[in-house]
Image (cartoon, grey):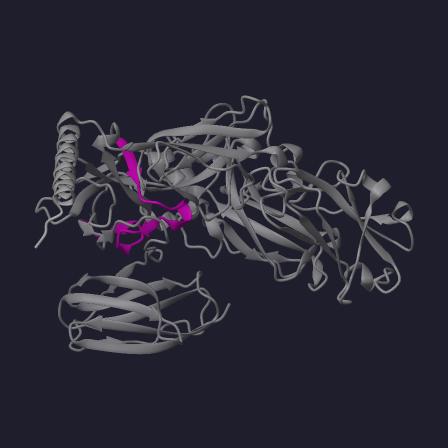
Amino acid sequence: MVFNTDKNLNNLLTNKNKGIIMKKVFLLFCLMLLTGVPLQAQTVDVTFQVDMSIQMARTIFNATTDTVRIRGSFDGWGAGLDMSDADNDSVYVVTVTSQPQSTVIFYKFFHTGTNGTWESDPNREVNTGTSATVTVDPYFFDGRTPYTSVSSPVTFNVDMRLPAKSDFDPATNHVYVAGNFTDWGTGALEMLDADGDSIFTVDVSTFTSGDLAIYKFIWSTGAASSGNWETPAGSDVFGSDNNRIYGVVDGNNDVTRFWENTDPNVNTGDGNILFVVDMSVANELGVFNPSVDSVQIRGEFNGWGDTDPARALLNQDPGDPNVWFLNIPMIQQVLNDTLIYKYFINNPGDETYSNTGWEVAISSTTAGNRDRPVAFLGQPNQEQEYQYFEGIHPDWVVPSGTTVEATFSVDMTPATGFDPAADSVVWVPRQPFYFAVHNIPWPGDQPRVLYLTDSNSDMVYEGTLTINGPDFNGFLYNYGYVDVSATNTLVQEGGSQEECRVRYVQQTGPRAFVSPYSFPQDVWTDGGQKPEEETPTSVEDIPGAIPNKYSLEQNYPNPFNPSTTIRFSIPEAGQVSLSIYNLLGEKVAEILNQELVTNTYEITYDASNLSSGVYFYTIKANNYVATKKMLLMK
């Protein structure tokens, strides 16, 4: 056998060198760990950008007097950070420093124009990744697609079925789009209806993302110069000329509008809606003075402002200074359209109500952002249901001299980044009414009202809130933790006020409460809807003979709108629950779940948040279960 000595020697040297290199790499790695030298950046600086040019054009944001702010999970949805426009290009910028790697930041932009405006839901989000810096591409305020100054075509579409009902003939007449990209009427572009559906279209390929398209539609029997220019109204319209505005974003842009911004498929009509709000709880708890303060209603029917006083400023009832009302005319409003609104406290001087005056109703609504909804019926005397400011009923007031002990608990196991050995868990209110009643600055650093502790190290934290009257029952809240590793920053659960929890202490009657009381255990949730209880009901015992058997009686009245009374008897003490179900068997409310002693009881149920229909109510007490049917007719 013959050995190739040179080859074998080279292999030995190569393997030896590899071993030496691996040892050096291992020693270097150990040295970096011992000296604290990082292998990669441990935190990330994230730069955010938002384009305010459309809000400026619509004069709902003034660059001289108003402020742009970013708020989000990076500071527990606290006060947020002001943004600046150093080069006056309408793009506001801020850098959020020292964020954890590979973490999702939830956030929104906010500006102080028109008494403060948030972007719409859902929250924005960005993953910080692992680089030392991240720059998020700019967005138009409330837009959902960024722009990076690349060529981006725009397709304009206009639905002409409305004018086709009058003197426009889609078969023979012409439709144009004119704007700052056509030198207006001089180079107006003709739009075509290739498939005969009365929707006219044209493609424009001269745009770069980030451009603003200012434009209008025209129809004519001939040339654009002799045509009929639309005068639309709506959220894409600005200025005295009623021009439309659109911010071009990356990719293919599709801009589809109705002529005059009016849907031709809907029926419109005139009518009036009477709104009434009761301010008695706000007055009793010292946050509203009916002799000095006033109340407004703001919604999409008046531009969310008070520039039209006849449609915004409520009148004080001469017979009851706590009741305010306004009968608002609706002109050619879409029938059965759901209009959203909120009540607003207008304080004179510097004494501004929390949240700059806006309520955040604790009561459940079908609208987002806890806006109140009303369906327009086109009637001359439509009346919206009687309402209470912030959704707080007078029966829920904790009277002076009364103390209620309420215990909150939360499972912190899902909380990303939470260190149980170092961090503290807190309960955080999110309703302006709570801030106002307790004289807490809004929003401040989101107050650490109640600290919770984990006595048996099972990741379930618990704390008892002492409620001393005068106060109120009803809690809109989140949980947070004080992050020691980030200079005691408060990290809150993700989600808007709409997605916060709502819970109530069980009541035994008007202004009477179960105390001590423990709420159902919560679970830390990052974003998404959290548990929201029905409004509290009062269960009252009926004097008389002690019952010797279980019973559940028929509700009365029945049919009902919106409240009804349910009577039941229990011959022995125990846990009693009473729940409401729809025809699908889904539980829509749990109106009672507490320990009761032997007796006959009545409970009043308010079904204001339910639609008309057949429902079932079921009682469970020890081994007794019974169900009856009831009919809600609104």
Residue 63 picture quarter = top right
- For the point 72% across and 36% down, the residue is 239
In this rendering, the answer to whether 570 lies above or below 441 is below
In this rendering, the answer to whether 501 lies above or below 632 is above
Image coords of residue 412 (percent x, y): 21, 47
- For the point 51% across and 43% down, the residue is 343
Is residue 317 in view from this perspective?
A: no
| Residue 46 in the figure: left or right of residue 519 | right
Task: Pick the residue in front: 400 or 430.
Answer: 430
Count all numbered tags in the image, as a single digit: 0
In this rendering, the answer to whether 116 lies above or below 362 is above
Image coords of residue 333 (percent x, y): 68, 55
| Magenta region includes residue 66 | no
Image coords of residue 162 (percent x, y): 77, 60
Residue extending furthest front?
A: 2
| Magenta region includes residue 513 | yes
Image coords of residue 283 (percent x, y): 42, 37
In this rendering, the answer to whether 169 lies above or below 373 is below
- For the point 66% across and 41% down, the residue is 310
| Residue 341 in the figure: left or right of residue 548 | right
| Residue 166 in the figure: left or right of residue 80 | right
- For the point 69% across and 41% down, the residue is 213
Residue 164 picture quarter = bottom right
Is residue 15 in view from this perspective?
A: yes
Quarter of the image containing the N terminus? Answer: bottom left
Task: Pick the residue in front: 360 or 40.
Answer: 40
Task: Pick the residue in front: 257 or 447.
Answer: 257
Specify start and end residues of the magenta stretch as a single range: 489-515
